[in-house]
Amino acid sequence: MNVHFALLALLAGEPRSGSQLRAEVAAGRGGVPLGKAGQVYPALYRLTRAGLADAAAAGDGGPEFRITARGQDELARWLRRAPDPAHGDELVLKIVLAGQVPGTDVHEVIQAHRRYLIEAMRQRIRAGRNGRTGASLSLALADTAEMYRLDSAIQWLDTADSLVGWEIGRAHV
């Protein structure tokens, strides 16, 4: 997982010192590992150089980091961008972090990913109708495995959406 976006999500809530961010990354957020604590300071400096975060002197003399408007825009785009399947549980992390970024509509983030996954399934189905999966057993097995992976991710998103709705309803009681 790219620690840069985890840091931006943490900073979206409120400014934090590097040591606070390092502790939060080490502890994980919502039970999801955010990266390695040793990556925090190098990532913070890359974020500030890129204009996605800035640092100001805090009361203790150390810098306090905050997300910039450009960083908020980049974070919002990342939350909605389809994850690379090679990055494992990035989709889970995006949904967990989306729920912690003030002003983010988690349902909308979930639906953006759901639409992408459904379209990917449709493309697989169309490819199969064109005889692609009949070409060889190994290709058919790979296509079938990918269909199950996509279907599983869609089912998880549906469950996540229900849980988010339940949590929001519970908060209003």
Image (cartoon, rainbow, N blue to C red):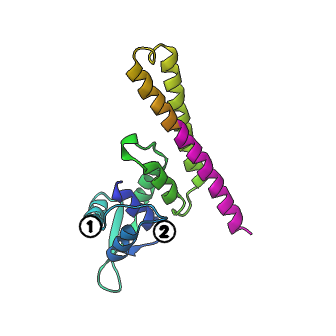
Left or right of residue 21: residue 114: right
Q: Where in the figure is residue 124, as x and y percent of width and height? A: 49, 25
Query: Which residue in the structure is indicated by mark 2?
Result: 13
Q: Which mark is residue 75?
A: none
Q: Quadrant of residue 10?
A: bottom left
The residue depicted at 48 percent of the width and 28 percent of the height is 144
162 in the magenta segment: yes
- Under mark 2, the amino acid is Gly
Viewer-closest of 54 and 80 = 80
Magenta stretch in the rendered image: 151-173
Q: Where in the figure is residue 82, as x and y percent of width and height? A: 46, 42
CB of mark 2 within 8 Å of CB of mark 1?
Answer: no
Element marked by disc 1: helix
The residue depicted at 53 percent of the width and 23 percent of the height is 125
Judge depth for marks 2 and 1 and give the one in front: 1
Find the distance from the CA under tag 2 to the CA under tag 1.
22 Å
The residue depicted at 58 percent of the width and 54 percent of the height is 106
